[in-house]
Amino acid sequence: MSNQYKRNSNELLKELCLEYCGGKKCKVCGTDWLPICCYDFHHEKGAKDEEISKMIQRKHKLDAELKTELNKCAVVCSNCHRQVAAKLIRV
């Protein structure tokens, strides 16, 4: 599998994951105009079994396992995600 194809399929799956979570809109600041690469999945409910980004890299579809993990997450922009991680703001 070429790197270009893998990147494109990963981007498509991330887009499907964002749609599953309600779209590309940051739950903290409301930003909805950034490119897909600027949105993260912040685990806010339950124990994190695996990082969404790692699951996207190894999967080819939006399956039950991925949906279960996404149900624990909020969509946040990368800027807000870093502030949440630094405990400067809350989701």
Image (tube, helix red, strand yellow):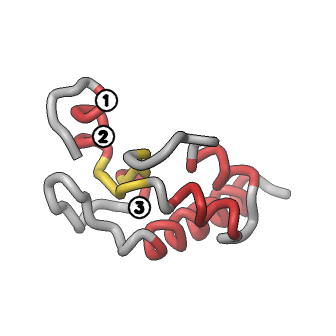
| Residue 20: mark in rendering | none
**Where is residue 1 shown, x and y percent of the image?**
85, 57
Three-letter residue code for mark 1: Ala
**Comes first in the chain, label 3 or label 2:** 3
- The numbered mark at residue 36 is 3
Secondary structure under badge 1? helix
Q: Pointer 1: what residue? A: 85
Q: Say few, some or many: other residues with alpha carbon within 10 Å of mark 1 (under 14 / 14 to 19 / 20 or more).
A: few
Residue 47's spot in the image, x, y percent?
53, 40
Q: Residue at x 37, y 74 (%)?
A: 22
Few, some or many residues within 10 Å of mark 2 (<14, 14–19, 20+): many
Q: Is residue 19 above or below residue 77?
A: below
In front here: 72 or 40?
A: 72
Q: CA distance from mark 1 to mark 2?
A: 6 Å
Q: Kindly identify the residue that appears in the image at 18 percent across and 61 percent down.
A: 31
Amino acid bearing label 2: His
Q: Which mark is residue 81?
A: 2
Q: CA distance from mark 3 to mark 1?
A: 20 Å
Instruction: Answer whether labels 3 and 2 touch (C-beta < 8 Å).
Output: no
Discs 1, 2 touching: Cβ within 8 Å:
yes
N-terminal-most mark, 3 or 1: 3
Q: Residues within 10 Å of mark 3 (few under 14, many from 20)?
A: some
Q: Report x, y in % for residue 7.
A: 64, 56
Q: Nearer the viewer, residue 84 or 58?
A: 84
Tell me which amino acid carries mark 3: Ile
Report whether 26 appears left or right of 60. left
